[in-house]
Every structure is written in C-alpha cells, then in structure tokens.
Amino acid sequence: MSGHDLNESADPANRGRIQAQGGGTEESEKWAQPEPPTMSEMLHKCDLLESKLSRAEKNERQVPLQQLRAFIRRAANYGGIGHTKKSFKKQGSSDIRVDIEVSKGSACVPDPKENSVE
Amino acid sequence: MNSPNSLFDHFPNEPAEYERAEAFWKAHWRELVRGSHDENEWEEPWIKNVFVDGTPCRDGNPIFSAVSRKRRLGVRVIQQQPNPSHDEEFSFWTDTVSIDSIEVKELVLSFGVTLSAVYDCLDAIRQWIDTEEVHLTLTNKYSISTGEFLTAKARHSFPLLYSRSVPREVDLAA
C-alpha cells in the first residue's frame, strides 16, 4: 500500500470514503491524496473498514461488502470511477449498507503494472 | 419479456431496456418538478454513472440522480437487480453527500422492479422536494392509470403514471 496520508496535501486532487452505514452503524475509511487510489488500495480500505465492524455488523454486511469489492474490481477494468456515490444495501433491511463516495477526482484505478526486470 | 406487474426487469442485461429505464425516471422527475418555483435549479443527473474510460456502468446504482445546489438537496434512485428469492419492494433513507465541497442532504430510494414500488418511490420523491421530509403514510396521493402505462410500455414510450391530485401543502418560499 502506498499509505497516502490525509494531511499529505491541503487540497488533494482525489478524495472520498467508503462507509458502513445503517442499523446504528457508522464507520468509514477515507482518502485524500494526490494520486487516485488504486484497486488494491481500495480493496485494502474495504478490509480496514470491515475490521472496524463487530461480528454482527460484519455478518449483516457480508453481501454488500462483496458487492462493493466486485464493483471496485469492475471499475479498475474500465480505468476507475470518477465522481460518484453508490450504496450496496443488504436485501430485506431498511438501510443496512456500505457506501462508496468519490467526492473529488477518481478512485479504483488499475494497479500499476509490475516493472519488468531485464 | 417483462411480467405485467414489473418494470424493466431485464435492465441489467439489456442496454436498450436500461436506457428506457433511465428515460422513464427522467420523464417522471421532470413532471414532478415542472411548474415548481425551483424547477430550473435542479441538475440531473448529478452522478454520471460511467467509468473513467467512458463505459456506462449500467448497474442501476443509481438509475437516476438530481441535485439542487441552492437548496443543498439531492435525490438518488437505485433500481435493484431482480432477485426472485427476495420480495423486497421499496426502502429509503437520508444521508449527506459532498458535491464540490458543498454538503448536500440526499434522499436515497432503493426499490425492486415492481410497479407498486415505483409508485411509492415517485411519491416519496415528491414529498422530499416539496417538504424535505418523507412519510410513507402520505403515499398514494396520485391517481394511477396502470392500463395506460402497460399499453404505453408496449410502445416503449412512457406517459406519466400519475397526476397530481392534491395541491402542494408547503410554500417553499415562506
């Protein structure tokens, strides 16, 4: 992971968050950095977000988290995603969900290709 | 083929049907805001549901979005993928979203593909843009002509499903 810091730039070109919301839960992982977060960085953020949740919170967001990760991978195939907000809701619940919000710049860009050693 | 009580249930797999679903929501949105004092202040869509390389996302998430920066108010409509094992129809919540560093209150509506869910959805949107609140007990204010809709659906055009049957209760300029 590149470990971009939220304080790295006063006005970073790329900003956003993923959130676990609804049912009394409110946890998030944010980014604010000069380069768009890559697919791997975003998947890592999903892991970090998941690690903040209790077992029950995690269980009820199992499918929404899968959907979010699938979306991140899909976005990377098409160069990433720009300004957006998407919600992945647990079916049958009123509002238990995970959200992705890209408020500035882009995110989920493809990982850089490994440098080939010649 | 769509079932009689469903709406665009093949939208995830058929681009033409997806475009009809987008056109449907756009047409109904315009009817909802038509004639209101802030009709021209709404931007739609505020989420362009495309990837960086321009490929349409076509996941229904959202199928429609609109925002009024002046009122700091937004609407986001999510059409769920059809799932026969769930009969979920309609749910909504409110949230905040940052648009160009402006915090906007948004109403998010998530619904299946049935017509009844669409009616609830439209009614909730109308309440939201009129009063910035939604109460499900206030639904069914519209007169609905399902027969007209189904006929129109076969023609792939979308006359409005409802008409206003009550005046606006709240003067937003007050």
Image (cartoon, coloured by chain):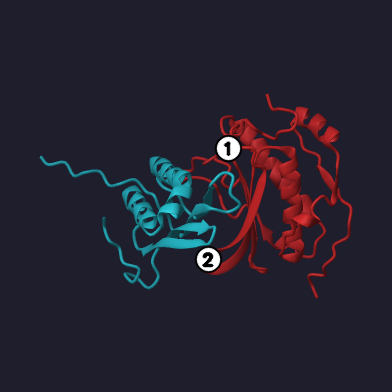
Left or right: where does residue B60 sit relative to residue B117? Answer: left
Q: Position of residue B92 (x, y in %)?
A: 64, 53
Tell me if residue A7 comes above or below residue B143 in the rendering: below
Cα distance, mark 2 to mark 1? 30 Å
- Kindly identify which chain the residue marked by label 2 belongs to: B
Residue depicted at x 72% and y 60%: B134
Same chain? Circles 2 and 1: yes
**Tag of residue B100:** 2
The chain shown in cyan is which? A
Q: Point out the residue furthest to the bottom here.
A: B174
> Mark 2 or mark 1: which is in front?
1
Residue depicted at x 32% and y 49%: A40
Q: Position of residue B36 (x, y in %)?
A: 80, 61
> Looking at the image, which is closer to me, A25 or B152?
A25
Q: Quadrant of residue B173?
A: bottom right
Tell me the colour chain B is drawn in.
red
Q: Point out the residue furthest to the top here.
A: B1
Figure disc tally: 2
> Looking at the image, which is closer to me, B54 or B73?
B73
Return the residue at label 1.
Answer: B81
